[in-house]
Image: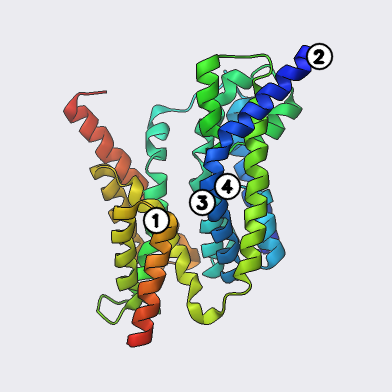
C-alpha cells in the first residue's frame, strides 16, 4: 500500500508542479477580474462567489461586463454557454483517460477542468498513456489553479474597492477583451469573424434584451467557420 | 433575473459541459463542424462586446476625434498587437483614455 500512496502523491505533486508556470499569468488575471467585477457593479460576495461557482476566467469577465450593462439574466447565461462551449472539447479529449473512475471522481475533476488545468494534463496523459493514478495529476493541477484563482480574485476585490470611480475603470473590461482578442487573430477567417461580429453588434445594438450580442456572436462564428471551410477546400491541405 | 440565480445557472451549464463527455465517454463524438466553429467563439463574442463599447456614445454611432473611448481602444489594439501582453494593453488603453479626458 505504501507504494500506491506514493504514486498518488507523486502524480498529484507532478500536476501541481506542471501548473506552476501557468499560475504566474493566472494570478494577475484573477486580480484584474476581482477589481473589474466590483467596478462593474457586482457586490464583493457575488464577485468572489462567481470565481468558485462559474470558475471560468473569460466567461466571468464577460458576465461582469453584461451585468454592468444590465443585460437580462437569460442572455448572460446564454453568453456564458457560448463562451464556455470549448470545455466540451476538453471533456471529450480527457474522457478516455478518466473512463474507469467513479462518478464522484468524474464530478470533482469536471468541476476543476479549466483551460489552464487541461493544457498541462493532456500533455502529461499523451506522454504517459493511461496510468492507474493519472487522475491525481489533474487533481493537483486543478486544485493549484482553483486556489490561486480564489486568492487572486479576493486580492483584486480588496484592491478594486480602493479605486475611485473617476478613474473610469469600467473601460478596463473592454480593454481586457481587446488584449484577449488581438492575439487570436492569426489568419483571415479569424479577422473576418471579429469584424463581422463587431459590425453586426453595432447594427443590431437597438434590439431588445441585448439579443444583438448573441446575433453578432453567432454571425462571427458562422463567418469564420465558413471561410475556413472554403480555404481548406481550396487549398486542399488538411 | 436575480444575479445569484444567473451565476448559479451559468455555473451549472459550465459544469455540465465539462462533465458531459467525460461522463458519456464512447457514446458521443464532437462533430467536426462544431470543433471547427469553436475556434471562432473568442474573436466573435469578444468583438461583439468591444465594438459597441468603442463606437457608440449613449447608444449613437460616434466616429470622431471627440470619442475618447474609440481612440483609447485603438491605442489598446496597437499595444496588444505589438506587446501581446494583457496588463500592458490595459495600462496603455487606460493611460490614453485618462489623458484624453484630462486634456479634452
**Which residue in the protein does label 1 denote?**
A179
User: Where is mark 4, residue-wise?
Assistant: A56
- Contact (CB < 8 A) between labels 4 and 2? no
Local crowd size for mark 2, using a 10 Å CA cut-off: few (<14), some (14–19), many (≥20): few
Foreground of the two, B61 or B70:
B70
Chain name for mark 2: A
The secondary structure type at the circle numbered 1 is helix
The residue pinned by badge 2 equals A2
SS of the residue under disc 4: loop
In this figure, which residue is indicated by the disc labeled 3? A58
Q: Earlier in the sequence, mark 3 or mark 2?
A: 2
**Is residue B6 visible to us here?**
no
Q: Residue at x 51, y 53 (%)?
A: A79
- Chain of the residue where label 1 is placed in the rendered structure: A
Q: Examine the rendered structure and indicate whether residue B47 appears above or below residue A102.
A: below
Q: Earlier in the sequence, mark 1 or mark 3?
A: 3
Whether pointer 4 and pointer 3 mark residues with C-beta atoms closer than 8 Å, the reply is: yes
- Which of label 3 and label 2 is nearer to you? 2
Q: Nearer the viewer, mark 2 or mark 1?
A: 2
Residue located at (57% from left, 75% from top): A163
Whole-number angstrom distance, CA of label 4 to CA of label 2? 36 Å
Mark 1–mark 3 Cα distance, whole angstroms, equals 12 Å
Identify the residue at the far left of this view: A234
Of circles 4 and 1, which is in front?
A: 1
Q: Position of residue A30 (x, y in %)?
A: 58, 54
Q: Give neighbour class at mark 3: few <14, some 14-19, many 20+ (Cα, 10 Å).
A: some
Chain ID, mark 3: A
Amino acid at each position: 500500500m505504501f507504494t500506491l500512496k506514493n504514486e498518488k502523491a507523486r502524480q498529484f505533486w507532478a500536476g501541481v508542479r506542471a501548473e506552476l508556470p501557468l499560475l504566474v499569468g493566472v494570478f494577475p488575471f484573477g486580480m484584474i477580474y476581482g477589481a473589474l467585477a466590483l467596478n462593474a457593479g457586482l457586490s464583493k460576495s457575488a464577485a468572489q462567489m462567481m470565481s468558485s461557482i462559474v470558475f471560468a476566467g473569460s466567461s466571468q469577465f464577460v458576465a461582469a461586463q453584461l451585468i454592468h450593462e444590465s443585460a437580462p439574466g437569460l442572455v448572460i447565461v446564454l453568453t456564458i454557454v457560448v463562451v464556455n462551449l470549448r470545455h466540451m472539447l476538453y471533456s471529450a479529449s480527457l474522457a478516455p483517460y478518466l473512463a474507469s473512475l467513479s462518478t464522484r471522481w468524474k464530478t470533482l475533476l469536471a468541476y476543476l477542468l479549466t483551460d489552464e488545468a487541461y493544457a498541462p494534463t493532456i500533455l502529461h496523459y499523451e506522454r504517459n498513456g493511461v496510468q492507474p493514478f493519472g487522475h491525481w495529476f489533474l487533481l493537483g493541477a486543478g486544485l493549484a489553479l482553483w486556489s490561486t484563482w480564489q486568492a487572486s480574485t479576493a486580492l483584486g476585490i480588496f484592491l478594486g474597492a480602493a479605486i475611485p470611480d473617476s478613474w473610469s475603470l469600467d473601460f478596463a473590461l473592454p480593454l481586457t477583451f481587446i488584449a484577449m482578442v488581438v492575439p487570436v487573430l492569426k489568419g483571415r477567417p479569424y479577422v473576418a469573424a471579429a469584424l463581422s461580429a463587431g459590425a453586426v453588434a453595432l447594427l443590431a445594438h437597438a434590439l431588445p434584451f441585448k439579443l444583438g450580442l448573441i446575433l453578432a456572436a453567432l454571425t462571427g462564428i458562422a463567418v469564420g467557420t465558413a471561410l475556413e471551410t472554403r480555404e481548406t477546400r481550396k487549398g486542399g491541405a488538411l | 433575473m436575480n444575479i445569484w440565480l444567473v451565476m448559479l445557472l451559468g455555473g451549472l451549464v459550465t459544469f455540465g459541459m465539462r462533465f458531459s463527455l467525460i461522463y458519456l465517454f464512447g457514446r458521443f463524438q464532437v462533430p467536426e463542424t462544431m470543433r471547427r466553429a469553436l475556434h471562432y467563439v473568442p474573436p466573435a463574442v469578444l468583438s461583439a462586446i468591444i465594438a459597441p463599447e468603442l463606437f457608440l456614445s449613449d447608444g449613437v454611432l460616434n466616429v470622431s476625434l471627440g470619442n475618447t473611448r474609440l481612440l483609447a481602444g485603438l491605442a489598446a489594439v496597437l499595444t496588444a498587437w505589438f506587446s501581446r501582453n494583457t496588463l500592458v494593453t490595459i495600462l496603455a488603453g487606460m493611460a490614453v483614455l485618462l489623458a484624453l479626458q484630462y486634456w479634452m
